[in-house]
Image (spheres, grey):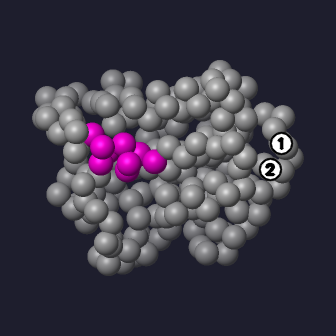
Amino acid sequence: MKKQVVIAMCGKTHSGKTFFGKKIARLVPKNVIIDHDVVAAFLKREFNNIHTDPKIQATRTPTNPDMRLLIPQLIYDYSLRNGYNVIITAAHTRKEIRRQQREIAKKYGAIFVLVFLNLPNKTLEKRVNHSTKPTNVLLRPNFKIELKKQHTYFENPSPEEADFFFEVKTNTDLKNVEGDLKNLIDSQS
């Protein structure tokens, strides 16, 4: 590839970030998928006392992250430093987190792509109600509470936050964005 590519998913719970990230991974040579749910499950299983410490949770911010953000950030930096393209399937709920991700991409001369999975709330609620996804990735008791909480703090992204910005609202958008990403990735081969 001419330049490394970072494709960061952005969206509320059950918007399809992991599904789409895995689908896109087939198009991206030499890639690493950083799935924050995998990290969260590992932390909860192996380091639950630190992961759920109320004192730590009360003070965490994008500029003072907990291990749930630090570990993926370490993997992200390491992957770019070693020539990998990166797909991040995290919510990226705050503008500051997305800004930090873009800065790391810039440090390595990588193209930063942001894919906003902006599905209607009714669709997300329906998916949450029928979810079989394990809740061991959550700090909250269930996905209904997680989605409700995300409505209060989610900061919608804008095109200015990325080198390339795509928004998915429908299944048709999903197919179009997949094609656009394929063209972008092919142009870097």
* Image location of residue 14, percent across then percent down: 41, 64
Check if mark 1's residue and mark 2's residue have beta carbons within 8 Å: yes
Secondary structure at badge 1 equals loop
- Residue at position x 52%, y 37% from top? 98
The dot on residue 146 is: none
* Image location of residue 34, percent across then percent down: 50, 43
* Image location of residue 29, percent across then percent down: 73, 46
Q: Disc 1 marks which residue?
A: 188
Q: Disc 2 marks which residue?
A: 184
Of badges 1 and 2, nearer the viewer stands: 1
Secondary structure at badge 2 equals helix
* Image location of residue 108, percent across then percent down: 68, 24
Locate the N terminus by quadrant: top right
Q: Amino acid at mark 1?
A: Gln
Residue 159 falls left or right of residue 96:
right
Give the residues in magenta: 35-43
- Residue at position x 24%, y 54% from top? 136
Q: CA distance from mark 1 to mark 2?
A: 7 Å
Q: Nearer the viewer, residue 58 or 50?
A: 50
Residue 44 falls left or right of residue 71:
left
Residue 4 falls left or right of residue 75:
right
